[in-house]
Image (tube, rainbow, N blue to C red):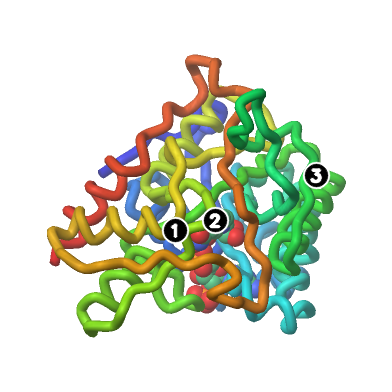
Amino acid sequence: MSASIPLFLSQKANPQIALLGAQGQLGQCFMSLGLPNLVAFSREDADLTQPQKLSKKFKDLAPDLVINCGAYNLVDKAETDYGPCTEVNALGVMHLAQICKEIGAPLVTYSTDHVFGGPAKRDSLGSPIPWVETDIPCPISVYGASKFAGECLAKASWEKCYLIRTCGLYGISGPGGKGGNFVEAILRAVSLGKPLRVVADQICTPTSVKNLARATLQLLGHFGPGTYHLTDQGSSTWHAFAQRIIQEAGLMVEVTPLTSADWPAAAKRPAFSVLGSIHSGNPQFPRQIPWQDSLGDYIKQRGS
Ligand SMILES: NC(=O)c1ccc[n+]([C@@H]2O[C@H](COP(=O)([O-])OP(=O)(O)OC[C@H]3O[C@@H](n4cnc5c(N)ncnc54)[C@H](OP(=O)(O)O)[C@@H]3O)[C@@H](O)[C@H]2O)c1
């Protein structure tokens, strides 16, 4: 699979792209796209919490674009581990934006649906309305707040930041720190014969990293810096997502629906965090793929 580089880069001779967090699931996906002159950094090679080393490395490399897939993603642990979480997601992203400004490279960095934790907006029939880029975030967890702080600090540091909010990611290489994504966790639980109990009162959009990486590159080709929402299309509870995973894998297992109150977690989750976009009517905005189709592709690709 190969992808073309964004238009503003193709006008440069031999443009370089630096990728941070290359060993995460989104980072691995960018690496699989066959982008020319992509220089990939693991956490060891480019640590967001070590700005001086990072600055030296990036000044030497002088990339034309920086894509940051690195983040502290342990949502529950962050409630008590708020120092390290903030150091990576807020201060780390700010330092990276400052470095990008010094070298003149646009920065792409990712944020989350967890920045929206307040009650959903509703239409006249009472149905919840997806959050768009112009809605005011209201995080209800340390993780959500750290990501929103990272957005604000990056934006205040460098005007050429693409802040991309996304949701419910899964990809072939699961997140190192989290021990696999939700799809893998469900399939592993089935293979171990564990009973499946999944929350049915939190609605989001499962999103394939493959689509997110491609959508990011398309966005860069047509849109200027700013805040964008990129997810797959549609919405689902985690319970319905689990049922669909089992169905797509050709399995027959019951999934018991739970409420959030039945499944107490350290961090509060948004009840409704589906992301929409004010740009969705623009034909150049990345086309969304129904989440069920993306999940089917993923299950086929990963094999049994
Ligand atoms: N996963 C989701 O459902 C989800 C939902 C919404 C938004 N997002 C956002 O989307 C982006 C990509 O997520 P993902 O699922 O691909 O994450 P992931 O698989 O957890 O990967 C995150 C990567 O960041 C690295 N990292 C951790 N601390 C770092 C540091 N101090 N400096 C540099 N790198 C560091 C990790 O390295 P190690 O492997 O060494 O730990 C890991 O490789 C993140 O910004 C995330 O917050 C994710």
Q: Position of residue 302 (x, y in %)?
A: 21, 61
Q: Is residue 194 left or right of residue 266?
A: left
- The crowding category of the residue bearing disc 1, from other C-alpha atoms within 10 Å (few below 14, some 14 to 19, many at least 20), is many
Among numbered discs 3 and 2, the one appearing first in the sequence: 3
Residue type of the residue flagged with mark 3: Lys
Dot label at residue 238: 1
Q: Nearer the viewer, residue 183 or 83?
A: 183
Who's the residue at 57% across and 67% down the image? 260
Who's the residue at 32% across and 70% down the image? 186
Helix, strand or loop status at disc 3: helix
Among numbered discs 2 and 1, the one appearing first in the sequence: 2
Q: Distance of mark 1 from mark 3, alpha carbons?
A: 32 Å
Q: Position of residue 252 (x, y in %)?
A: 16, 64
Residue type of the residue flagged with mark 1: Trp
Foreground: disc 1 or disc 3: 1
Q: Position of residue 3 (x, y in %)?
A: 35, 38
Who's the residue at 52% across and 27% down the image? 221
Q: Nearer the viewer, residue 70 or 133?
A: 133
Residue type of the residue flagged with mark 2: Gln
Q: Is residue 130 left or right of residue 233?
A: right
Q: Which image quarter: residue 106? A: top right
Relative vertical location of residue 154 with respect to residue 278 in this rendering, above or below: below
Instruction: Find disc 3 in the rendering and name its residue.
Output: 155
Contact, CB < 8 Å: mark 2 with mark 1? yes
Q: Is mark 2 within 8 Å of ligand 1?
A: no
Q: Is residue 175 left or right of residue 91?
A: left
Instruction: Find disc 2 in the rendering and name its residue.
Output: 202
Contact, CB < 8 Å: mark 1 with mark 3? no
The residue positioned farthest toward the front in the image shown:
125
Q: How many marks?
A: 3
